[in-house]
Image (cartoon, helix red, strand yellow):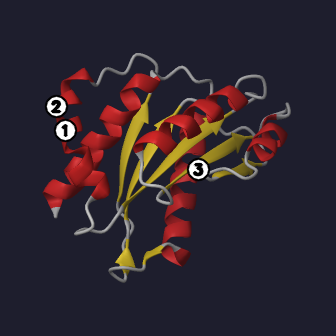
Amino acid sequence: SRFRPLLLSFQDGSNFEEVHDIQERNDDIFGSSERAPVKLTVILPSYNEALRIRDTLKEYTLQLDRIWERGNCDILVVNDGSTDDTMQVVQEFSGDRTIPVDCISLERNVGKGAAVARGISEVGRRQSSNEKDEKNGGTMETIILVADADGSGDMECLESMTTLLASILEIEK
């Protein structure tokens, strides 16, 4: 199987207003029964974010549940060696949710870049081992969105960004 993620970093100050015209294609991109679904994974690298990550996760799960096809998205928190209760907060939050939230933990703080790389590696490992598109018998295309765990990204841009990336996948087919 082939793992070819599309990656977008979602940072404070991101401006994706120019892609609003693509939103008109949401039904074609997300709801079409004629093409394989697109998987979205949001990676949240986090270091000592116990005080903020619950609110961030709540906001992301609410937004993703609204804009993405149910069952085809999840959130992966990469705990970058936090010394606070970040891991515990994520585990408590991740209970029975419509958008799955999972957490992997690094033994020591290795920095944001390495935490992102570890998250991407984990997404690829999971996809190649068990996430098959049963309808078409192949691996789902994957969009990986990297966002800050402190919630500093503008949630109003989330739909535009994911729509843009999904449209890129559609164009490439």
Q: Is residue 98 visible?
A: yes
* Residue lying at 22% horizontally and 28% vertically, measured from the top left: 20
SS state under label 3: loop
Q: What is the number of the mark on residue 24?
A: 1
Q: Quadrant of the N terminus?
A: bottom left
Residue type, label 2: Asp
Q: CA distance from mark 2 to mark 3?
A: 27 Å
Please state the horizontal and vertical placement of residue 141, each as a whole percent of the image: 34, 63
Q: Quadrant of the C terminus?
A: bottom left
- State the residue in front, 95 or 87: 95
- Quick one: label 2, few (<14), some, or many (20+) residues within 10 Å? few
Q: Are marks 1 and 2 in contact (CB under 8 Å)?
A: yes
- State the residue in front, 84 or 76: 76
Q: What is the number of the mark on residue 21?
A: 2
The residue that disc 3 covers is 99
Residue type, label 1: Glu
SS state under label 2: helix
* Residue lying at 55% horizontally and 36% vertically, measured from the top left: 62
